């Protein structure tokens, strides 16, 4: 497929999911919440800028890796058959070139951060790279995504404070469970197609217990978020954010009551507001000043 320069740029943007910012926001909000909690207020501007830019670049690179890995199956899935690689708008060498450019930019951003954060970033890149391939071997690729998408949280704490503490790990655990829940919602959209082509997911593993397991994961997430607040001595602002998240989880359960594909996708996207609620709760808790939780 021959495309004009403008058409090729548009295809690259689609490969990076620039037109679908939900994934970037799902990655960004909990990372920003972690920065605010770690700094007990606005983090250093250079660190904040690095994490915002790094979130966009890392998610874009992850999407390219995912589409390279899935290029032979995406054409058989209703939701993904028009993606640039299966549609022929981007060739495999072009995709690898774009990945190399995005990876180089990620490295450049990470090099502005301290040494502990650089090492964590290296480990996180390895974890993220495994996710697209796990769906061939295990029903738990969502767990790998939970770890990969939550990896910015410990990085945020080391970038601000140079070390990790129990608060960082509580937020990391809450985020990971939440991500398994919402990526299961995402997998419910593709479940019928995945069963045909042999791709595995938690949506397939949980079967008719999917709604119940998602509910348990959401309740566990809330429990960890409350535990974080108690451990860190947080007050009203944080708990308002958690309460909003509880309401949004209840709404998602209502949406998926009949397991309709469009409703499951809407429930998945609703998690952007869960992430924003937690970030807003952290901002409401700490405002714009503070010296950091040690």
Image (cartoon, rainbow, N blue to C red):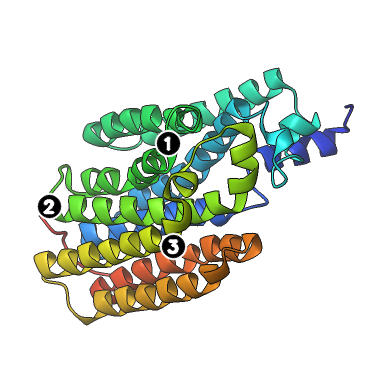
Element type at marker 1? helix
Residue where numbered disc 3 is placed: 211
**Residue 135 or 168: which is nearer the viewer?**
135
**Residue 23 or 104: which is nearer the viewer?**
23
Can you tell which quarter of the image residue 50 is in? top left
Looking at the image, tell me whether mark 3 or mark 2 is earlier in sequence order. 2
Whether residue 213 can be seen here? yes
**Viewport quadrant of the N terminus:** top right
Residue 238 is left or right of residue 100, and the answer is left
**Mark 2 burial class by Cα count in 10 Å: few <14, some 14-19, many 20+:** few
Q: Residue at x 43, y 37 (%)?
A: 139
**Viewport quadrant of the C terminus:** bottom left
**Mark 3 burial class by Cα count in 10 Å: few <14, some 14-19, many 20+:** many
Q: Position of residue 212 (x, y in %)?
A: 38, 63
Please report contact status of discs 3 and 2: CB closer than 8 Å, yes or no. Answer: no
**Residue 190 or 21: which is nearer the viewer?**
190
Residue where numbered disc 2 is placed: 166
Can you tell which quarter of the image residue 149 is in? top left
Spatial CA span between label 2 and label 1: 27 Å
Residue where numbered disc 1 is placed: 109
Element type at marker 2? helix
């Amino acid at each position: 497929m021959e495309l004009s320069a403008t058409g090729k740029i548009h295809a690259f943007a689609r490969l990076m999911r620039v037109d679908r910012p939900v994934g970037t926001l799902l990655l960004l909000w909990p990372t920003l919440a972690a920065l605010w909690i770690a700094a007990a207020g606005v983090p250093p501007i250079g660190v904040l800028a690095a994490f915002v830019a790094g979130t966009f670049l890392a998610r874009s690179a992850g999407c390219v890796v995912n589409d390279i890995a899935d290029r032979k199956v995406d054409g058989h899935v209703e939701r993904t058959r028009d993606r640039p690689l299966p549609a022929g708008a981007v060739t495999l060498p072009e995709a690898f070139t774009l990945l190399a450019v995005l990876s180089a930019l990620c490295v450049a951003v990470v090099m502005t951060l301290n040494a502990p954060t650089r090492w964590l970033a290296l480990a996180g890149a390895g974890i993220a790279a495994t996710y697209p391939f796990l769906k061939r071997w295990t029903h738990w690729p969502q767990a790998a995504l939970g770890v990969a998408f939550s990896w910015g949280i410990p990085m945020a704490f080391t970038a601000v404070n140079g070390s990790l503490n129990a608060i960082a790990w509580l937020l990391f655990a809450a985020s990971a469970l939440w991500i398994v829940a919402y990526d299961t919602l995402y997998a419910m959209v593709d479940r019928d197609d995945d069963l045909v082509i042999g791709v595995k997911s938690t949506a397939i593993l949980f079967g008719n217990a999917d709604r119940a397991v998602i509910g348990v994961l959401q309740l566990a997430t809330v429990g960890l978020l409350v535990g974080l607040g108690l451990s860190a001595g947080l007050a009203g602002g944080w708990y308002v954010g958690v309460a909003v998240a509880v309401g949004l989880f209840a709404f998602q359960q209502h949406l998926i009551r009949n397991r309709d594909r469009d409703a499951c996708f809407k429930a998945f996207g609703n998690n952007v507001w869960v992430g924003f609620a937690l970030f807003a709760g952290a901002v409401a808790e700490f405002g714009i000043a503070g010296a950091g939780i040690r």
